Amino acid sequence: MADVARLAGVSSQTVSRVSNGYAGVNEETRRQVLAAMKELGYRPNSAARALKRGEFRTIGVITFSLATTGNVRTLEAIATSAAAEGYAVTLLPVAVPTQDEVRGAFSRLEELAVDAVIVIMEVHLLDAVTLQLPPHVQVVVVDSDAGEHYTVVDTDQAGGTRAAVRHLLELGHETVWHLGGPEGSFAAQRRTDAWRRTLTEAGRTPPPLFRGDWSAESGYRAGLELAAREECTAVFAANDQMALGLMRALHERGRRVPGDVSVIGFDDIPEAGSFLPPLTTVHQDFAEVGRLCVQAVLRKMRQEGPERGTTLVPTRLVTRASAAPPPGRG
């Protein structure tokens, strides 16, 4: 630091302020110091800065799966939002969703020196009714029913589902079939519950529930069964990949989309508009989920945020070409 100060013609204190990102240094001086750092190959010692400041500028993220679109896009949004705030992200996947595995993940993250933790909690724990996290760690949970105990950020799953089901009913379909996600998923359960509730409130009897595992292949398998049911004229799929597999099965069985069967998905993945036909789907704002997670965890670190409660990010229905009135009503 002294070498940088001599080369730049400033004090060591000024070099310290520039390297730590503090305000109060004029732009010309800042440029001189940065140029001297570059010339001398100077790198601020992050460990020393952490000891001085009492923080590591790192957020830990625990997730149970990197195989689902929602988790991957949420993680990307968290990393982008954290970087914009000057924080790095340390990712720790957990192989099995159990309480012991979660505790172990927290212990490992503490060893890796993080300031706070975001848990992407897509599935229920196998061995506990509610999530129990270490009390001394600042935590925000994504996609969970833990709002009574922790700070939770989630997509408005129920609102998006209501919009999809009501759209199909308004097109004239007598009822709407549902291809749900896996039974252990929080998001899948909320979408299934909202599907049933919306049909019941409209005076319709919910038909039998079909389930997949979020994959296009599981959507295809369910689609082969749904294609055999002539009374099925509309399907709400719990995600876009399953909707893709479903449409393939309907096509192979000679049932046109949307001429014979309307299909609506959930997520609005980038490829949804390139499906054949382009998919009507519920848009999730993953970028906003990630931004709110980072903002919430930073507020908790500064002791400015609420200790518990759920923030819902709105969804919106994106209408394309895969939903239409039922046969004979077009």
Image: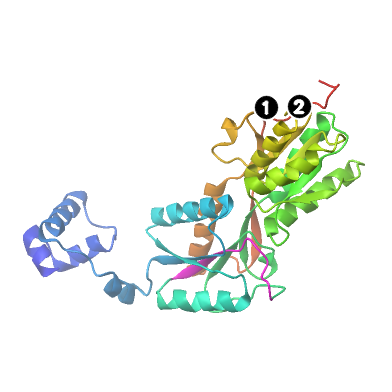
Q: Amino acid at mark 1?
A: Ala
Residue in the foreground of this view, choosing between 227 and 281 = 227
SS for dot 1: loop
Quarter of the image with the N terminus is bottom left
Residue at figure coordinates x 56%, y 50% from the top left: 69
* Residue 123 image position (x, y, % from top left): 65, 63
Does the stretch in magenta take in 9? no
Q: Is residue 6 visible?
A: yes
Quarter of the figure with residue 124: bottom right
Label 2's element?
loop
Does 39 appear above or below 207?
below
Looking at the image, residue 56 lies above or below residue 167: below
Q: Main secondary structure of the magenta part?
A: loop
Residue 122: in magenta span: yes
Say which quadrant the C terminus sits in.
top right
To which residue does mark 2 refer? 324
Q: Residue at the location (64% across, 42% down)?
A: 240
Amino acid type, residue under disc 2 in the picture: Ala
Residue extent of the magenta highlight? 115-127
Work out whether 41 lies above or below 45: above
Q: Is residue 311 left or right of residue 1?
A: right
Question: Label 2 crowding class (10 Å Cα cut-off): few <14, some 14-19, many 20+?
Answer: many
The percent coordinates of residue 225 (x first, y second) are 79, 43
Residue at the spot of label 1: 321
Q: Tell me, yes or no, if residue 315 can be seen here.
A: no
Q: Residues within 10 Å of mark 1 (few under 14, many from 20)?
A: some
Q: Depth check: 140 or 108 in front?
A: 108
Q: CA distance from mark 2 to mark 1?
A: 8 Å
Circles 2 and 1, Cβ within 8 Å, touching? The answer is yes
